[in-house]
Image (cartoon, grey):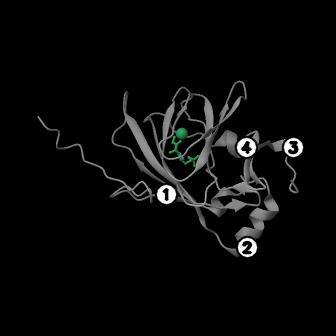
Amino acid sequence: MIPYSIPSITFDPITGTINGVQPQDRKLSDLKGYFIDSNAYNARLALDNPVIYSVASVEPDQGDGQLHYGIGVIAPGQVGAEYFMTKGHFHAWRPAAEVYIGLSGEGFMLLEEETTGKETLLPLNAQHIVYVPGATAHRTINTGSVPLVYIGIYPSAAGHDYGVIAERNFNSVLVNVNGQSTLVKRDRFSIAS
Ligand code: F6R
Ligand code: ZN
Protein backbone atom coordinates (compact mmCIF):
# COMPACT_ATOMS: atom_id res chain seq x y z
CA MET A 1 0.00 0.00 0.00
CA ILE A 2 1.32 3.47 -0.84
CA PRO A 3 1.32 5.82 2.20
CA TYR A 4 -0.36 8.80 0.51
CA SER A 5 -0.59 10.66 3.81
CA ILE A 6 3.21 11.16 3.86
CA PRO A 7 3.83 14.23 1.72
CA SER A 8 6.52 14.47 -0.91
CA ILE A 9 8.75 17.43 -0.02
CA THR A 10 10.89 19.31 -2.51
CA PHE A 11 13.62 21.87 -1.86
CA ASP A 12 16.01 24.10 -3.76
CA PRO A 13 19.66 23.39 -2.82
CA ILE A 14 20.79 26.85 -3.95
CA THR A 15 18.21 29.04 -2.19
CA GLY A 16 17.49 26.60 0.65
CA THR A 17 13.73 26.99 0.13
CA ILE A 18 11.52 24.05 1.13
CA ASN A 19 8.20 24.18 -0.72
CA GLY A 20 5.41 25.22 1.62
CA VAL A 21 7.68 25.92 4.62
CA GLN A 22 8.13 29.44 6.01
CA PRO A 23 11.74 29.97 7.17
CA GLN A 24 12.63 31.67 10.44
CA ASP A 25 15.03 34.58 9.95
CA ARG A 26 17.86 35.53 12.30
CA LYS A 27 18.85 39.13 11.72
CA LEU A 28 22.02 40.90 12.82
CA SER A 29 20.09 42.41 15.75
CA ASP A 30 19.22 38.89 16.97
CA LEU A 31 22.94 38.12 17.26
CA LYS A 32 23.93 40.78 19.77
CA GLY A 33 26.91 39.55 21.81
CA TYR A 34 27.79 36.67 19.50
CA PHE A 35 30.46 38.36 17.33
CA ILE A 36 33.79 39.10 18.98
CA ASP A 37 34.26 42.59 17.50
CA SER A 38 31.49 44.57 19.19
CA ASN A 39 32.60 47.84 17.57
CA ALA A 40 32.27 46.31 14.10
CA TYR A 41 28.91 44.81 15.14
CA ASN A 42 27.55 48.16 16.33
CA ALA A 43 28.90 50.00 13.28
CA ARG A 44 27.19 47.55 10.92
CA LEU A 45 23.93 47.63 12.86
CA ALA A 46 23.93 51.42 12.62
CA LEU A 47 23.91 51.00 8.83
CA ASP A 48 21.42 48.17 8.35
CA ASN A 49 20.06 44.99 9.89
CA PRO A 50 20.55 42.20 7.35
CA VAL A 51 19.29 38.64 7.69
CA ILE A 52 22.38 36.66 8.72
CA TYR A 53 20.73 33.26 8.41
CA SER A 54 17.39 31.55 8.14
CA VAL A 55 16.16 28.04 8.91
CA ALA A 56 13.19 26.25 7.37
CA SER A 57 12.22 23.48 9.79
CA VAL A 58 10.08 20.41 9.14
CA GLU A 59 8.69 18.57 12.16
CA PRO A 60 6.58 15.72 10.82
CA ASP A 61 5.85 14.07 14.17
CA GLN A 62 6.92 13.85 17.83
CA GLY A 63 7.79 10.83 19.92
CA ASP A 64 10.25 7.95 20.19
CA GLY A 65 12.12 7.30 16.96
CA GLN A 66 10.86 10.42 15.16
CA LEU A 67 13.14 12.79 13.26
CA HIS A 68 13.00 16.49 12.49
CA TYR A 69 15.06 18.36 9.91
CA GLY A 70 15.81 21.87 8.80
CA ILE A 71 17.52 23.58 5.90
CA GLY A 72 19.74 26.45 6.94
CA VAL A 73 20.91 29.31 4.73
CA ILE A 74 23.72 31.57 5.95
CA ALA A 75 24.40 34.76 3.99
CA PRO A 76 27.98 35.57 2.96
CA GLY A 77 29.64 38.35 4.92
CA GLN A 78 31.64 39.31 7.99
CA VAL A 79 31.35 41.34 11.17
CA GLY A 80 34.86 42.70 11.42
CA ALA A 81 37.08 39.72 10.60
CA GLU A 82 34.55 37.13 11.78
CA TYR A 83 32.41 35.37 9.21
CA PHE A 84 28.61 35.31 9.34
CA MET A 85 27.56 32.29 11.38
CA THR A 86 24.76 30.72 13.39
CA LYS A 87 24.29 31.29 17.12
CA GLY A 88 25.23 27.68 17.82
CA HIS A 89 23.77 25.47 20.49
CA PHE A 90 23.81 22.25 22.45
CA HIS A 91 20.82 20.00 22.18
CA ALA A 92 18.61 20.29 25.25
CA TRP A 93 18.51 16.48 25.29
CA ARG A 94 22.29 16.08 25.44
CA PRO A 95 22.58 12.57 23.94
CA ALA A 96 20.90 13.72 20.70
CA ALA A 97 23.25 13.61 17.72
CA GLU A 98 22.68 15.31 14.36
CA VAL A 99 23.73 14.81 10.73
CA TYR A 100 24.51 17.86 8.60
CA ILE A 101 24.82 17.64 4.82
CA GLY A 102 26.21 20.52 2.76
CA LEU A 103 24.02 21.43 -0.23
CA SER A 104 25.74 24.50 -1.71
CA GLY A 105 28.25 27.18 -0.84
CA GLU A 106 31.39 26.94 1.28
CA GLY A 107 31.83 26.92 4.99
CA PHE A 108 32.67 25.06 8.15
CA MET A 109 31.14 23.55 11.25
CA LEU A 110 32.74 24.29 14.58
CA LEU A 111 32.16 21.56 17.16
CA GLU A 112 32.99 21.77 20.85
CA GLU A 113 32.56 18.85 23.22
CA GLU A 114 30.89 19.85 26.46
CA THR A 115 32.89 17.76 28.93
CA THR A 116 36.39 17.99 27.41
CA GLY A 117 36.15 21.31 25.54
CA LYS A 118 37.73 19.56 22.53
CA GLU A 119 37.20 21.59 19.37
CA THR A 120 36.86 20.28 15.83
CA LEU A 121 36.56 22.38 12.68
CA LEU A 122 35.16 20.49 9.68
CA PRO A 123 34.43 21.73 6.16
CA LEU A 124 30.76 21.94 5.23
CA ASN A 125 30.64 22.30 1.46
CA ALA A 126 28.27 20.71 -1.06
CA GLN A 127 28.43 16.91 -0.67
CA HIS A 128 30.14 17.06 2.72
CA ILE A 129 28.58 15.23 5.65
CA VAL A 130 29.28 16.21 9.24
CA TYR A 131 28.21 13.98 12.12
CA VAL A 132 27.63 15.97 15.30
CA PRO A 133 27.84 13.65 18.32
CA GLY A 134 25.68 14.17 21.40
CA ALA A 135 26.73 16.69 24.05
CA THR A 136 28.59 18.74 21.42
CA ALA A 137 27.96 22.41 20.71
CA HIS A 138 27.72 23.12 16.98
CA ARG A 139 27.93 26.30 14.94
CA THR A 140 27.80 26.68 11.14
CA ILE A 141 29.93 29.35 9.46
CA ASN A 142 29.85 30.73 5.90
CA THR A 143 33.38 31.48 4.65
CA GLY A 144 32.41 31.80 0.98
CA SER A 145 31.01 34.52 -1.25
CA VAL A 146 27.57 32.95 -1.84
CA PRO A 147 24.96 31.62 0.61
CA LEU A 148 25.93 28.45 2.49
CA VAL A 149 23.01 26.00 2.32
CA TYR A 150 22.84 22.80 4.37
CA ILE A 151 20.40 20.37 5.90
CA GLY A 152 20.49 19.18 9.52
CA ILE A 153 18.60 16.04 10.59
CA TYR A 154 18.08 15.36 14.28
CA PRO A 155 15.90 13.44 16.76
CA SER A 156 12.54 15.12 17.36
CA ALA A 157 13.34 15.18 21.08
CA ALA A 158 16.67 17.02 20.62
CA GLY A 159 15.49 20.54 21.42
CA HIS A 160 17.81 23.55 21.52
CA ASP A 161 19.85 24.78 24.47
CA TYR A 162 21.16 28.21 23.46
CA GLY A 163 21.90 29.33 27.00
CA VAL A 164 25.43 28.01 27.48
CA ILE A 165 26.73 29.47 24.21
CA ALA A 166 24.85 32.76 24.66
CA GLU A 167 26.57 33.05 28.04
CA ARG A 168 30.17 32.09 27.23
CA ASN A 169 30.28 31.58 23.43
CA PHE A 170 32.62 29.03 21.73
CA ASN A 171 36.25 28.91 22.87
CA SER A 172 37.48 29.86 19.39
CA VAL A 173 36.48 32.21 16.59
CA LEU A 174 36.81 31.64 12.85
CA VAL A 175 38.21 34.79 11.28
CA ASN A 176 39.45 35.98 7.91
CA VAL A 177 43.20 36.63 8.21
CA ASN A 178 44.62 37.85 4.89
CA GLY A 179 41.96 35.91 2.99
CA GLN A 180 42.49 32.68 4.96
CA SER A 181 39.89 31.16 7.28
CA THR A 182 41.76 30.94 10.57
CA LEU A 183 40.64 29.48 13.89
CA VAL A 184 41.85 31.62 16.79
CA LYS A 185 41.34 31.10 20.53
CA ARG A 186 38.84 33.70 21.69
CA ASP A 187 41.10 34.92 24.50
CA ARG A 188 44.04 35.38 22.09
CA PHE A 189 42.11 37.29 19.44
CA SER A 190 42.99 40.93 19.03
CA ILE A 191 41.00 43.23 16.77
CA ALA A 192 44.17 44.29 14.95
CA SER A 193 45.06 40.69 13.98
C1 F6R B 1 19.06 21.82 14.75
C2 F6R B 1 20.26 22.40 14.12
C3 F6R B 1 20.11 23.34 12.95
C4 F6R B 1 20.26 24.76 13.49
C5 F6R B 1 20.48 25.82 12.43
C6 F6R B 1 20.50 27.22 13.03
O1 F6R B 1 19.41 21.05 15.86
O2 F6R B 1 21.36 22.21 14.57
O3 F6R B 1 18.92 23.18 12.25
O4 F6R B 1 19.13 25.04 14.30
O5 F6R B 1 21.70 25.59 11.79
O6 F6R B 1 21.47 27.32 14.05
P1 F6R B 1 21.08 27.79 15.52
O7 F6R B 1 19.94 26.89 15.96
O8 F6R B 1 22.29 27.59 16.31
O9 F6R B 1 20.60 29.19 15.44
ZN1 ZN C 1 21.48 21.06 16.41
Q: Is mark 3 within 8 Å of ligand 1?
A: no
Residue of label 4: 169
Relative to residue 88, is residue 54 drawn left or right?
A: left
User: Residue at horizontal 38%, vertical 56%?
Assistant: 12
- Which element carries disc 4, helix, strand or loop? loop
- Which element carries disc 2, helix, strand or loop? helix
Instruction: Measure how far apart labels 2 and 4 are at the Cα level.
Output: 23 Å
User: Residue at horizontal 78%, vertical 56%?
Assistant: 178
Relative to residue 2, is residue 108 drawn left or right?
A: right
Image height check: is 46 above or below 15? below
Instruction: Please name the amino acid that badge 1 sits on.
Output: Gln
- Residue depth check, mark 3 versus mark 1: number of the one nearer the observer: 3
Precedes in sequence: disc 3 or disc 1: 1
Q: Residues within 10 Å of mark 3 (few under 14, many from 20)?
A: few
Instruction: Measure how far apart labels 1 and 2 are at the Cα level.
Output: 23 Å
The label shown at residue 24 is 1
Instruction: Please name the amino acid that badge 4 sits on.
Output: Asn
In front: 176, or 54?
176
User: What quarter of the picture does the N terminus occupy?
Assistant: top left
Precedes in sequence: disc 2 or disc 4: 2
Relative to residue 158, is residue 21 drawn left or right?
A: left
In front: 78, or 4?
78
Residue of label 2: 46
Where residue 136 sits, quadrant-wise, is: top right
- Residue depth check, mark 4 versus mark 3: number of the one nearer the observer: 3
Instruction: Measure how far apart labels 4 and 3 are at the Cα level.
Output: 14 Å
- Which element carries disc 3, helix, strand or loop? helix
